Amino acid sequence: MAAIEALIFDVDGTLADTERDGHRVAFNRAFADAGLDWDWDVDLYGRLLAVTGGKERIKFYLNEFNMAFEKPADLDGFVAGLHAAKTAHYKQLMVEGRVPLRPGVERLLREARDAGIPLAIATTTTVDNVTSLLENTLGADAIDWFAEIGAGDIVPAKKPAPDIYDWVLQRMGLSGPLAIAFEDSGHGVSSAADAGIERIVVTTNDYTRDQDFSRAALVLDQLGEDDRLPRTADGSELDRPVDLGLLRAL
């Protein structure tokens, strides 16, 4: 069985289904605060997820779906202000417990910690968003569970570029084959794979289940619990939840 020297997790859609009922709702609240009549419904938001990064997503929306909007002279400042307001609303949603962790996530995190395997984050979302999710689902000290937090604008190129995984691996002193990455999207798989990570576990969601996961080692609907086992893309049920034993066998 292959050694595991780190588990590296994406956040949005992977640790929790944050996109539809978290980020999307927070964006709409920020737009309303700013007096904008924009409404990102579930279907539109799925199309906007083609672009990673919240500020980038707003610009993509203006360029592709709302061309009639008269952009302000300081577009970057305008977008940054909207994004900051959105982050505040997202953090409040986390405080209210609106978005729980996905099945099996807490179980696997605790199993890895008990085994002394380092944990890390590699995401395009902000550090504030990561902290809010972890603290309001796992407890006030949960951010300290992770040896490295690669998040937000810490690297210039976001997924599908490999930069965020490269950064995390370098900070941890690891090469790709020694780590396992957890993702939910095709962009995330490309990012991890291009950073040299060979063992990638995908847990799909409503927005991503039809994307290209050909470079992943395992594609499931969830990590699973003893009473709720994971299923593969063809509907086959695993005989166990995703645990360290299964991961070492990849």
Image: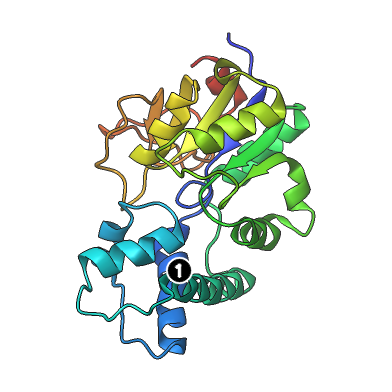
**Residue 174 location in percent, x, y?**
66, 21
> Image point 47% across, 43% down: which residue?
157
| Residue in the image at 21% along x and 64% along y | 64
Q: Residue at x 63, y 34 (%)?
A: 168
Q: Give residue 176's quadrant in the image.
A: top right
Question: Relative to 72, is 142 on the left or the right?
Answer: right
Up-down: is 192 above or below 247?
Answer: below
**Front residue of 152 and 233:** 152
Q: Secondary structure at mark 1?
A: helix
- For disc 1, the marked residue is 76
Q: Tell me the quadrant of the picture where the N terminus can be found.
A: top right
Q: Residue furthest bottom?
A: 35
Which residue, as the protein is rendered here, is positioned at the far front? Answer: 73
Residue at 52%, 14% in the rendered image = 249
Neighbor class of circle 1 (other Cα within 10 Å; few <14, some 14-19, many 20+) is few
Q: Residue 143 location in percent, x, y?
A: 73, 51
Q: Amino acid at mark 1?
A: Asp
Left/right of residue 170 with respect to residue 230 in the rendered view:
right
- Residue 161 locus on image (x, y percent): 43, 36
| Model colouring | rainbow
Q: Is residue 67 left or right of residue 2?
A: left
One can see residue 203 in this view = no
In this view, 155 is above or below 88:
above
